[in-house]
Amino acid sequence: MQINGLAAIVTGGASGLGGATAAHLASLGAKVTIFDLNTELGEAHAKSFGGYFIKVDVTSEDAVNAALAEAEGLHGKARILVNCAGIATGARVVGRDGLATPLADFTKVVMINLIGTYNVISKFAARIHDAEQVGEERGVIINTASVAAYEGQIGQAAYSASKGGIVGIGLPIARELARFGIRVMTIAPGIFWTPMMAGFTQEVQDALGAQVPFPSRLGKPEEYAQLVENIVTNPMLNGEVIRLDGAIRMTPK
């Protein structure tokens, strides 16, 4: 599917992987709408490439439905969805105080990362399942997992569960939506530079990058965006997870 002229939705598109993806798709001629909770960053980023921003809680059915309708009214029916919204809060099962971590901490991560992703997928697919085809397909959905789905580290139980869930839903949904001509793909990034990394010293960032076999550095958000482009434009990519990780395999901690 050619990107130029199509409408696209990027959740978590105010910064990081989603921010790079939103800007890259726009540079290829897409009409991009960012869904994010950070109004200040989201509006500024959307303005920088001529896109549109909507403040959206991806866990809310009403909010997602309303945002999709608003974006469609501005840019037409979206055919590209990239789900990057998520959080990476870490917590051990048993804290250093010997007490169990509150269940709410686990639930929050799964709710935003996994259930939020599913929520946007379902609402997006429902809007385009009977739309006019673009070539031989109707749309592409790209979800963001993580290498933590396979090699979660200590303290990442909730994060790994949420990202493992994203890996798990990919193929069943791809099989279901195939009859509508909607593809579903998943990217599992390794260690990438994101706003979260900005809180670490350069020494820590370099140490993390050195864990990557090759290239031995943090991934660049633009490299994630490049893979999004490859997936959208290659119709045979469907129902699969692509690790974008420089061959890293995470250690226990």
Image (cartoon, grey):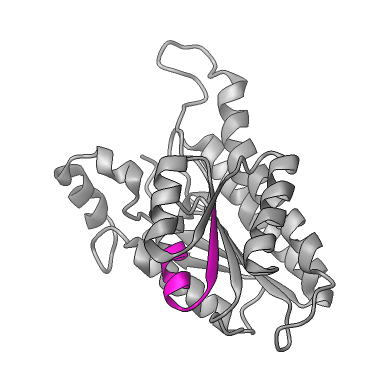
- Where does the C terminus fall, quadrant-wise? top left
Q: Is residue 215 above or below residue 112?
A: below
- Where does the N terminus fall, quadrant-wise? bottom right
Q: Left or right? Give the position of 188 relative to 128.
A: left
Q: How many marks?
A: 0
Pick whichever, 26 or 202, lies toward us.
26
Report if residue 151 lies within the magenta region. no
Q: Residue furthest bottom?
A: 135
Q: Position of residue 158 (x, y in %)?
A: 55, 36
Pick whichever, 122 or 169, lies toward us.
122
Q: Name which residue lies at 42% across and 70% down.
A: 24
Pick whichever, 62 or 196, lies toward us.
62
Report if residue 32 lies within the magenta region. yes
Task: Report which quarter residue 20 is drawn in.
Answer: bottom left
Q: Is residue 15 visible?
A: no
Q: Position of residue 167 (x, y in %)?
A: 62, 57
- For the record, the magenta segment spans 21-34
Q: Is residue 163 visible?
A: yes
Q: Position of residue 207 (x, y in %)?
A: 20, 49
Q: Name which residue lies at 51% across and 12% down.
A: 99
